[in-house]
Amino acid sequence: MITILRLGHRLGRDDRISTHCGLVARALGADAIIYSGDHDGSMIEGLKKTSKRWGGKFKISYEAKWKKILDSHKKKGFCIVHATMYGLPLQKRIKEIRKKKKILFVIGGEKVPGELYSLVNYNIAVTNQPHSEVAALAIFMHEYFKGKELDNRFKGKINIVPQEKGKKVIER
């Protein structure tokens, strides 16, 4: 089970990037995403509609206090993994992390509170250069699932039939 925690969503500034975090999390095999920061009901409802139309059992929720999420997930036995360019290289820790069956993967938004670094089990970096939390999430999921997430199949109201050319969409 993998849950994503998106820290510090900001209304009017992070709508698109936070939406993309949710889309990538769902498409690449996460079970849920939790947003903290500003409450954005329209973004959350939009992601819920996408999940319902395209299939899967992906959950989307909001919690104002990120520490509450960390505490509750720790009590449930989750391993907390924080994506940060200041962390150790993902490739040096992924084998250990794969052994964990319940992961809370934390991705930032606004400036990440310094105390977070000491509250997690792993601070990992997909690179030590500035980049997007969407990229970090996608690469983590790909490495965690060893590429098998690319074979995920969803049964929804809308399904794409892969084509070399053109577009084929089945709507139920």
Image (cartoon, grey):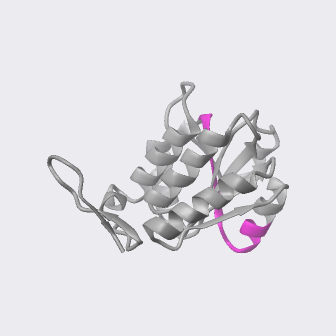
Q: Residue furthest front?
A: 171
Residue 100 seen anywhere in this rendered image of the structure: no
Residue 163 covered by magenta stretch: no
- Residue 32, quarter of the rendered image: bottom right
Where does the magenta region start and end?
72-86
Q: Residue furthest left?
A: 164
Q: Who's the residue at 52% across and 61% down the image?
A: 50
Q: In the rendered view, does 99 fall on the left or right side of 6? A: left
Q: In the rendered view, does 96 fall on the left or right side of 122? A: left
Pick the front one: 161 or 89? 161
Residue 78 covered by magenta stretch: yes
Q: How many marks?
A: 0
Dividing the image into 4 quarters, which one contains the N terminus?
Answer: bottom right
Q: What is the x, y in percent for residue 152?
A: 35, 65
Q: Who's the residue at 40% across and 51% down the image?
A: 142
Q: Is residue 4 above or below residue 84?
A: below
Residue 139 seen anywhere in this rendered image of the structure: yes
Q: In the rendered view, does 85 fall on the left or right side of 72? A: left
Q: In the rendered view, does 160 fall on the left or right side of 72? A: left
Q: What is the x, y in percent for residue 65?
A: 85, 55
Pick the front one: 25 or 54? 54
Q: What is the x, y in percent for residue 34?
A: 69, 59
Q: Is residue 59 above or below residue 83?
A: below
Q: What is the x, y in percent for residue 66?
A: 80, 54
